[in-house]
Amino acid sequence: MSGTRPGRTSGVDLTMMYAVHRALRRDLGRLTAARRPDPDTFRAGWRLFTGYLTIHHVSEDESLWPVLRAKLVDKPEELAVLRAMEAEHTRLDQVLATVDAALDGEPGTPVPADLMADVSACLTDHLDHEEARALPMLEALLTAAEWQGFVAGQRRRVGLRGAPTFIPWLLDGVSDDERRSVLAVLPVPLRLVYGAFWRPRYERTSPWRRPAGAR
């Protein structure tokens, strides 16, 4: 998770933000498809999905929304957007907890369809709302140093041990153009390690691994 790419005039580079959102939307579809026919795959995929979703949202709650709020003290409409972001995070935590509780039940029992429908609706609506209203405010108002505070917090939560899974998870199933765009944000050594080691290992061990020979 890097920050601003060379040559940008804004202090905020949203490449990784959109990449995380894209990966979360992708996993929603996979989890819905795996819910009934493959409960073991669902459980493993759910752990990846909720782990990265939690990291992402805690980083926003601690490093983005408070910084923005301090800049919007005289702008009630924009402050209402921040309150909505926080309320949506709380609602998501609640629906995720209902799925966690269902997974604590009888092994092999599929998560009820209505619970996954709630997760999908809540997260999709939240991501759409954030991209439409909150991200433009971030891009317009945050300094490079403030944005880097968020970047550093999210990187710290992923951790050095988590990066070998996080980066290939982020890029799983994306187009070549999307992959190049995200990798351009990373330091060159990480790009090389990703291609040589992280991606092949992820493709062997991921709950969403594809048959040999598939892209």
Image (cartoon, rainbow, N blue to C red):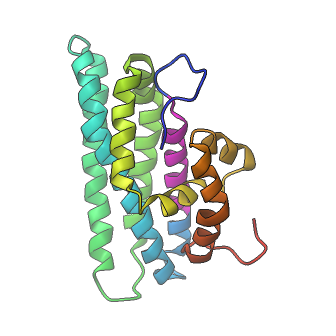
Q: Which residue is drawn at the image coordinates 36% and 25% (left, top)?
A: 145
Residue placed farthest to the top in the image?
A: 74
Residue at point 26% right, 26% down?
67
Quadrant including the C terminus: bottom right
Q: Position of residue 72 (x, y in %)?
A: 26, 16
Residue 158 point in image, percent of width and height? 38, 55
**Snapshot quadrant of residue 30:** bottom right
Task: Say if 104 sits above or below 99 in the image.
Answer: below
Residue furthest front in the image: 189
Q: Decide which of 209, 33 is in the foreground and name it.
A: 209
Identity of the residue furthest to the bottom in this view: 107
Predominant secondary structure, magenta span: helix
Is 158 situated above or below 148? Answer: below
What residue is at 37 percent from the left and 21 percent from the top?
142
Does the stretch in magenta take in 95? no
Q: Quadrant of residue 133?
A: top left
